[in-house]
């Protein structure tokens, strides 16, 4: 579904991504782990088109994305859940969700149906639907951001550290929901995560990113068993 | 006496408020401050005189034509030229450029139009009204009425329509709005067009009172700028409150202290707000 070859991108003079190649197959959950500053967020931003591709290719269903705007990429079925609690603070939950469908659907019934789906995945959002997003707890805001991305019914969704600053109990719940989304709607998912232990349990394939390059890749099972990964990311020592 | 001053203050404040809301919408959507905002009031005022006195259009069509032309010139053309050229560089180059634009507009009007003050009639006949002990003009009520209708329409547009909510989304979290596929540039264009319509309405109210003159925007733009800061630059309701407050302060100062001090008192309030609540009375703190 997504095939990246020799991707180079960065900010100003600095080159953050230095020749990334990776592949995510339809229906899979791909996990990207790596230390801070490895370029994980930059990778997502480049795939989504917030940052221009300097060289290399991003193929989405055999179509080259590199010259397309973010808006076109949204319409092709790509969604990004950015890091942090990127809600619209003064809009209520309902309006936040509405914005998620902004460019993709105009039909009110369809929007309503998609909202119902979101409420099924995150029941707490239904209770909070007329509350301003700023009044939600951190975990609830993270759920809202994921639900908002789902409103565009993406076929490929990128999640940038959804566990950041959230209680362990909620992290578990959110990961379970990500799994459900992948299973029930066949949404292909790419997940950047610091919390490698729980992420590797969830995903199918994994990539270890360091210094703007892919250092290792394999099934999540293989990665979880790898001595170097264990040492560096899972906090286990032999 | 108090009622009379209240009505006069609100009437003046209504004109300021519409301009201040324009400042606020531009800031929210584009993070730019338009220092030619005063001239943005002068231009539609001149357009009204042009359509009415030169082209001899009937009164109402002349005003509507002026509003449409100013939406095009001060909204669309402004966005496609100066804003697009400068927005990537942040606010400062835009501020300097719009200060220059203000000079250009004033001097061009003096040279190519007229340095004289022109008369422009009000939309309704000006009759003195008496209400209890209060004496005021029908124009005062009319100003409050027009501004209220315009602001309520704007409020409904922003709160209830999809486009309006998208504008709010851009104001509240531009990055996330872009990720939703909301066209941020289109929203900025929309804000500039709305601003142009707001200043045109305030011009239609200000013209009969101040006369149409090349420098009529100086004071209006400045007072509205103070109003937006006092009320809160990043909140439409703040700009509205600020506008009304500035109008009231001016009228009450003029009545109880001295006409000469009316601008001074506004500045005292402005300084107090900047010292004690720099985000404005209803404004929210922003991270830069």
Image (spheres, rainbow, N blue to C red):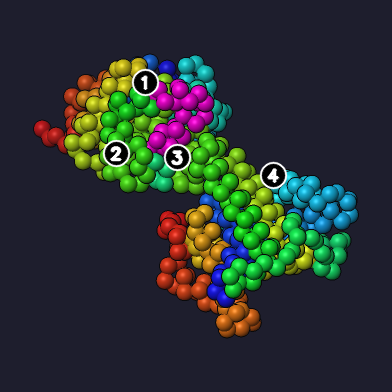
Q: Which residue is mark 1?
A: A188
Tell me whether circle 3 and circle 4 mark residues in contact (CB < 8 Å).
Answer: no
Q: Chain of mark 4?
A: B
| Category of crowding for the residue at label 1, using alpha-carbon neighbours closer than 10 angstroms: few (below 14), some (14–19), many (at least 20) | many
Asked whether residue B219 is drawn in magenta, I would say no
How packed mark 2 is, by other alpha carbons closer than 10 Å (few <14, some 14-19, many 20 or more), is many
Magenta residues span A93-114
Instruction: Examine the structure image and report whether residue A96 is included in the region drawn in magenta.
Output: yes
In the rendered view, tell whether residue B223 sits above or below residue A87: below
x and y percent of residue B265 in the render? 55, 77
Q: Position of residue A173 (x, y in %)?
A: 22, 31
Quadrant that contains the C terminus of chain A: top left
Q: How many marks?
A: 4
Q: Circle 4 sits on which residue?
A: B76
Judging from the image, mark 3 belongs to the subunit labelled: B
Which is nearer the eye, B161 or A180?
Answer: B161
Helix, strand or loop at label 4? It is helix
Residue that mark 2 sits on: A140
- Give the side of residue A23 with respect to residue B24, left or right: left
Residue A28, compared with residue A102, is above or below; it is above
Farthest bottom residue?
A: B257
Q: Is disc 2 placed on a helix, strand or loop?
A: helix
Are the residues flagged by discs 4 and 1 from a single subunit?
A: no
In whole angstroms, how far apart are the C-alphas of marks 3 and 4?
Answer: 25 Å
Mark carried by residue B176: 3
Residue at the location (31% across, 33% down)? A126
Q: Is residue B151 visible?
A: yes
Whole-number angstrom distance, CA of label 2 to CA of label 4 = 40 Å
Q: CA distance from mark 4 to mark 1?
A: 41 Å
Relative image position of residue A105 (x, y in whole percent): 50, 25
């Amino acid at each position: 579904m997504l095939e990246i070859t020799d991707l180079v991108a960065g900010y100003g003079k600095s080159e953050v991504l230095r020749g990334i190649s990776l592949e995510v197959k339809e229906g899979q959950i791909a996990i990207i782990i790596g230390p801070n500053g490895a370029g994980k967020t930059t990778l997502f931003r480049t795939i989504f088109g917030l940052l221009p591709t300097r060289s290399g290719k991003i193929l989405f269903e055999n179509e080259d994305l590199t010259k397309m705007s973010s808006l076109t990429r949204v319409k092709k079925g790509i969604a990004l859940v950015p890091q942090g609690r990127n809600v619209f603070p003064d809009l209520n939950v309902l309006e936040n969700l509405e914005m998620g469908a902004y460019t993709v659907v105009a039909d009110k019934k369809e929007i309503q149906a998609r909202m119902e789906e979101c409420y099924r995945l995150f029941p707490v959002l239904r209770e909070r639907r007329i509350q301003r997003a700023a009044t939600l707890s951190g975990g609830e805001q993270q759920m809202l951001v994921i639900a908002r991305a789902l409103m565009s019914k993406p076929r490929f969704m990128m999640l940038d550290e959804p566990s950041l600053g959230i209680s362990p109990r909620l992290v578990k719940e959110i990961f379970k929901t990500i799994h459900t989304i992948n299973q029930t709607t066949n949404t292909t998912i790419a997940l950047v995560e610091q919390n490698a232990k729980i992420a590797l349990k969830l995903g199918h394939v994994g990539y270890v990113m360091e210094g703007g390059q892919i250092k290792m890749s394999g099934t999540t099972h293989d990665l979880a068993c790898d001595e170097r990964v264990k040492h560096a990311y899972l906090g286990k020592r032999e | 006496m108090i009622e009379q001053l209240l009505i006069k203050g609100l009437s003046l404040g209504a004109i300021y408020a519409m301009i201040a809301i324009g400042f606020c919408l531009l800031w929210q959507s584009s993070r730019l401050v338009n220092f030619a905002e005063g001239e943005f009031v002068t231009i539609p005022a001149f357009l009204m005189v042009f359509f009415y006195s030169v082209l001899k259009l009937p009164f109402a069509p002349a005003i509507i034509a002026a509003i449409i032309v100013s939406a095009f010139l001060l909204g669309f053309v402004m966005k496609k030229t100066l804003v697009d050229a400068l927005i990537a560089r942040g606010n400062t180059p835009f501020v300097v450029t719009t200060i220059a634009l203000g000079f250009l507009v004033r001097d061009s009007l003096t040279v190519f139009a007229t340095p004289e003050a022109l008369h422009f009639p009000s939309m309704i006949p000006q009759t003195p009204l008496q209400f209890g002990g209060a004496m005021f003009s029908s124009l005062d009520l009319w100003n409050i009425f027009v501004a209220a209708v315009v602001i309520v329409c704007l409020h409904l547009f922003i709160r209830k329509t999809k486009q309006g909510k998208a504008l709010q989304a851009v104001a509240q979290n531009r990055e996330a709005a872009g990720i939703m596929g909301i066209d941020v540039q289109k929203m900025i264009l929309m804000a500039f067009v709305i601003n142009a319509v707001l200043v045109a309405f305030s011009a239609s109210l200000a013209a009969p009172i101040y006369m149409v003159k090349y420098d009529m925007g100086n004071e209006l733009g400045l007072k509205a700028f103070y109003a937006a800061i006092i009320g809160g630059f990043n909140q439409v309701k703040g700009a509205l409150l600020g506008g009304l407050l500035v109008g009231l302060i001016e009228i009450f100062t003029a009545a109880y202290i001295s006409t000469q001090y009316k601008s001074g008192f506004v500045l005292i309030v402005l300084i107090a707000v900047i010292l004690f609540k720099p985000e404005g009375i209803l404004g929210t703190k922003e991270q830069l």
